């Protein structure tokens, strides 16, 4: 099951050209570190953000308000040329499906010394626009996403300026779990931390493999979220189930339970399923505290009884940094 698609942000950007006045990117963008640059915690990526944009740790993004923000997703060991083609193919797929969203601008250019492509389009959300920048090299890709109200040209300008300021320093020190709002104990199991994309943290067998690119990887994914009410927690758990089904997973009977994890309300769903002909077992938790929340998703295809026992054991150690 490919639970995360790296370029989901751009898969809905369709090529219906509708140029916007006053918007453009030069053929070569000079990227220079300034005193305004800050390192996004947990990454080797830096960005200059306006003073009124604040870091929202649970969403791993800098935002002025809930409709105006920039978010960076660092993809280590990913060939930019490959990721760019995946993005373009995703766009073409949406065109063929007839799910049309206006594209205002697209350009390939040099971002510092790196190849880059930028999309500017109407967002899937009503009355919002998005700008998506991808750049990188043979061994890394960075995706920077900005969203803003559709007719807010001032916010559009500051979002674009921030996105074009982003740069990647391969020698920068970083703690990949710096923004994690949870702790777990994987000792005594075969699962180890393998990486993260924005606020989504992955654990695989011996920390090897990539669950983003391998749809059949045995893995645990934990994602940080803002706090939710019990009703919102239940609704989010149900929505996750619907997303599994819409992604092509054939879901068997679902066991649903309200429970407590580290003293916090949680919604537990567990079930067996089939994805592209291969049986799987899934264990899903949505846990919300007073100030923060997480989703915990374990999915195993091989040695299912043994590995699902390890997933349940790890889930029992989950604690929120609330």
Image (tube, grey):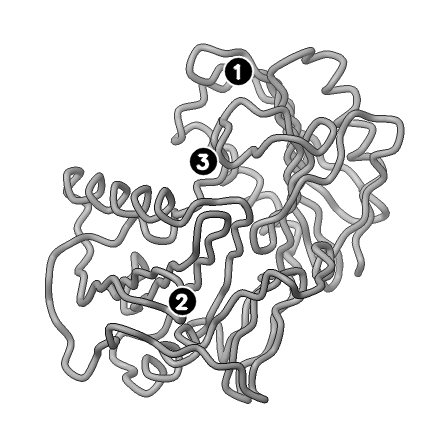
Report the residue at 54% width, 11% height from top: 279
Residue wearing tag 1? 252
Q: Nearer the viewer, residue 89 or 155?
A: 89
The Cα–Cα distance between marks 3 and 2, rounded to whole angstroms, is: 38 Å
Q: Work out whether residue 148 or residue 160 is closer to the camera in this orientation and state it.
A: 160
The CA span between labels 3 and 1 is 14 Å
Q: Quick one: 245 or 309, which is closer to the camera?
A: 309
Q: Quadrant of the C terminus?
A: bottom right
**Mark 3 Cα-neighbour bin, 10 Å: few <14, some 14–19, many ≥20:** few
- Check disc 2 and report the residue beneath it: 113
Image coords of residue 245 (percent x, y): 43, 27
Circle 3 sits in a helix, a strand or a loop, which is it? helix
Task: Name the residue rendered at 47%, 31% in the picture.
Answer: 2
- Which residue corresponds to the image point at 57% horizontal and 55% vertical from the top-left? 198
Q: Earlier in the sequence, mark 3 or mark 2?
A: 2
**Lower position in the chain sequence, tag 3 or tag 1:** 3
Q: Residues within 10 Å of mark 1 (few under 14, many from 20)?
A: few
State yes or no: discs 3 and 1 in contact (Cβ < 8 Å).
Answer: no
Farthest residue in the right direction?
188
Mark 2 closeness class: few <14, some 14–19, many ≥20 residues within 10 Å: few
Disc ID at residue 243? 3
Residue 12 place in picture, x, y as percent: 28, 50
């Amino acid at each position: 099951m490919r639970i995360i698609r790296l370029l989901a942000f751009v898969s809905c950007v369709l090529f219906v050209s509708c140029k916007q006045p006053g918007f453009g990117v030069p053929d070569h963008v000079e990227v220079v570190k300034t005193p305004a640059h800050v390192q996004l915690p947990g990454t080797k990526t830096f960005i200059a953000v306006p003073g009124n944009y604040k870091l929202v740790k649970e969403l791993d993004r800098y935002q002025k308000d809930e409709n105006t923000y920039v978010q960076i997703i660092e993809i280590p060991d990913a060939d930019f040329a490959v990721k760019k083609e995946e993005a373009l193919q995703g766009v073409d797929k949406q065109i063929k499906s007839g799910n049309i969203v206006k594209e205002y601008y697209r350009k390939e250019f040099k971002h510092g010394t790196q190849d880059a492509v930028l999309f500017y389009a109407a967002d899937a959300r009503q009355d919002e626009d998005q700008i998506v920048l991808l750049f990188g090299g043979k061994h890394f890709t960075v995706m920077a996403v900005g969203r803003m109200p559709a007719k807010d040209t001032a916010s559009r300008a500051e979002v674009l300026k921030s996105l074009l300021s982003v740069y990647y320093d391969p020698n920068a020190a970083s703690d990949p779990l710096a923004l994690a709002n949870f702790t777990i104990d994987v000792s005594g199991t075969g699962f180890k931390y393998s990486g993260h994309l924005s606020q989504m943290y992955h654990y695989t067998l011996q920390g090897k493999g990539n669950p983003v690119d391998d749809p059949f990887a045995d893995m645990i994914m934990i994602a940080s979220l803002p706090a939710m009410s019990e009703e919102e927690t239940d609704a989010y758990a149900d929505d996750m189930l619907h997303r599994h089904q819409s992604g092509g997973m054939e879901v068997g009977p679902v066991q649903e339970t309200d429970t407590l994890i580290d003293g916090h309300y949680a919604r537990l769903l567990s079930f067996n399923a089939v994805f592209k002909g291969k049986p799987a077992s899934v264990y899903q938790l949505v846990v919300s505290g007073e100030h923060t929340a997480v989703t915990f998703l374990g999915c195993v295809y091989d040695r299912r009884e043994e590995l699902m026992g390890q997933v349940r054991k790890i889930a029992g150690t989950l604690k929120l940094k609330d």
